[in-house]
Amino acid sequence: MEPSASQARSRTGARTVSAALLAGRKALMGCVAGILVMTLASMAAAQTKAPAVTPAAKDGKVADRSVSDWLMRMHEASRQRAYVGTFVVSVGGAMSSARIWHVCDGEQQMERVESLTGAPRSTFRRNDQVMTFLPESRVVVSERRESLGLFPNLLQSGDSSIAQFYRARASGSERVAGFDADVVQLRPEDNLRFGYRVWTEKKTGLVIKLQTLDGEGRVLEQAAFSELQLDVPVSMAKLTQMMGNTEGYQIEKPDMLKTAAAAEGWVLKNSVPGFKSMSCYKRSVGAAADARHENTLQWIFSDGLASVSLFVEAYDARRHGQPGTRVLGATHTLTRRMGDWWLTAVGEVPPQTLVAFAQGLERTK
């Protein structure tokens, strides 16, 4: 999952991007504000026109579906279905939950995610517009999160490589949250990405449970609906009204500027197999205490399922500690100094994948 700009900003003093990312990750799991990333579909579906579903994806036998068939079926279900449910995420022995309301109206997608554990938090998403309400601090963070294209965009493109790096295998049927579900395993072809076990509702294809697996098949993270109502009358107008009710809140709009890595003087001299550059931004990360803000580059890559972000900022000995690695569930973080620069690589990938990115990153000017 990608950390939001608000999570990357320090409000309590100078700290590194790495620390901010880990803090943001923990906060995210506490409120499950980004759980639909884990369904492989909803975040990317907001602005993407879905390609036609192939016959195999729609009507074919479960055992005959390819990786693309499975993913397109999940994507279509996330776009076309209105639902309300309680979603539970388990990471490293900790559990968090949230209530979700999701509705679609043609190309318009909208959802509300209300935390049930941890600090109170409500997140509203309408297409690419996201507003996060933090009642305790009376702050609303307003952002535009461009679809990363992690899943439907790559499936549409002629050079999609998902099928080269993952294999799908049907693994029977189980019941989840009262629904009969097909179980499919998405197995990686190398050690640069994790595997997934996915439960999809038999009739619709909606993802109702997901596990991220390491190379030995051990569960690193799990997310599932504990209760779900499909095709319920969720009011987009009511959600829109709630999203716009910011009275009594301070509105923050994190600074993000779309750019190109090459224009900022960076290149990945050795590509990481299967991972493609998706987008690149400059964002403000700094300490409000001394009004010191620096442009931090965020370069985002994806293989169609997994994503990696490279954060690059000017090295500051007062803020940056020793290089190292950290792990939380399936999310790994690597930090290291590169001359006058400090790199933070983060993603839901094995540690060797982040090492490959770090070794391939090079300054050109």
Image (tube, helix red, strand yellow):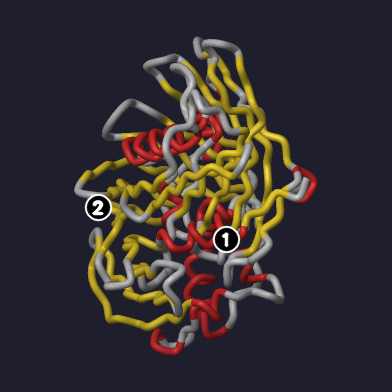
Q: Is residue 197 above or below residue 285?
A: below
Tag on residue 302? 1
**In this orientation, which residue lies closer to the viewer: 200 or 11?**
11
Give the quarter of the image for residue 29.
top left
Name above or below for residue 271 compared with residue 311.
below
x and y percent of residue 355 in the render? 49, 58
* Residue at 68% across, 62% down: 269
Residue at 77%, 50% (x, y): give it. Answer: 262
Image-based side of 86 in relation to 58, left or right: left
Residue mark closest to the camera, 2 vs 1:
1
The disc placed on residue 205 is none
Instruction: Identify the element where label 2 is drawn.
Output: strand
Instruction: Pick whichever of labels 2 and 1 is earlier in the sequence.
Output: 2
Say which residue appears at 47% left-offset and 87% top-offset. Answer: 60
Tell me the quarter of the picture where residue 259 sits: top right
Mark 2–mark 1 CB contact (< 8 Å): no
Q: Specify the farthest residue to the left.
A: 93
- The spot of residue 340 in percent (x, y) is 63, 37
Looking at the picture, tell me which residue is in the foreground, 85 or 3: 3
Q: Which residue is mark 2?
A: 226
Residue 168's image quarter? bottom left
Question: Residue at horizontal 32%, vertical 74%?
Answer: 183
Hey, which residue is sitting farthest front in the picture? 339
Which amino acid is tagged 2? Ser
Report how many numbered discs are placed on residues in the image: 2
**Which amino acid type corresponds to the residue marked 1 in the rendered image?**
Ser
The span from disc 2 to disc 1 (Cα, nearest Å) is 29 Å
SS at circle 1:
strand
Which percent across, then down, holds residue 248?
50, 10
Q: Residues within 10 Å of mark 2 (few under 14, many from 20)?
A: some
Near-viewer residue (229 or 93) = 93
